[in-house]
Image (cartoon, rainbow, N blue to C red):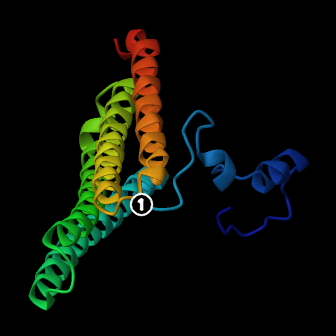
Amino acid sequence: MTSQTLNANLTPDEIRALNTPQEPFEGDARNHSEPPLPLHPLGFKALSYLGKQLMVRVFTVLFYGLSALLVVSGMLQFFTELMAGERSFMSITVNVVNSLIIGLAMFELGAGINKEYTDADQEENVFTNIRRTITRFLGTVCIALVLESLIMIIKYSQLDLAGNLFYPVAILGGASLLLISLGGFLALTKGHTK
């Protein structure tokens, strides 16, 4: 309300007109159809996107780092045990391959996270992204399980522990069941990707 001098000769209607505001209140100034202003200048959606990208980078670097650490430690273990000469070459190699398989799984997980949670996933169908991520990860897990079971078979055959062969056979059975389940998942979700 503007500052005006009050004239004693005003009628009641003129006094009422002076008491009503000429400008709308701050709450009425906005049109109710307009969205409210976001609390942050970038908006919640932008903060969500930045948070997602930050976590993608953190997990990618974490899994890549663990993968590199496993590869380096496997190679150091191989050369130190080879120089020590306490164990056979085949036994040392089997242990190093175990470390390298786990490193490969970590690398594949980091690569999958980095690839699947980038800008490209905004444009594609969500079912396509899920199918590709699950297929890639479960494929890596199946390869790691099969290699691990083959290494166990070699190790048990060298140590004459044929009674323990049901462990690698169970791992092979689990990997087969996982692969069959993946095939069923891909067959059931085939129509949703279009």
Q: Where is residue 150 in the image (x, y as percent from the top left)?
A: 29, 47
Q: Which residue is drawn at 22% across and 62% down?
A: 97
Residue sitting farthest toward the bottom: 84
List x then y, in percent, for residue 147: 28, 48
Identity of the residue furthest to the front in this view:
160
Choose top left, top right, bottom left or bottom right for residue 42: bottom left
Q: Nearer the viewer, residue 34 or 83?
A: 83
Give the amino acid at mark 1: Gly
Q: Residue at x 43, y 41 (%)?
A: 169
Secondary structure at badge 1 equals: helix
Residue behind mark 1: 51
User: In the image, what residue occupies the spot 85% across and 45% down?
Assistant: 13
Query: How many numbered dots are placed on residues in this image?
Result: 1
Mark 1, residues whose alpha carbon is within 10 Å: few (<14), some, or many (≥20)?
few
Give whichever of 63, 58 is nearer the camera: 63
Q: Is residue 186 left or right of residue 111?
A: right
Q: Can residue 67 be seen in this view?
A: yes
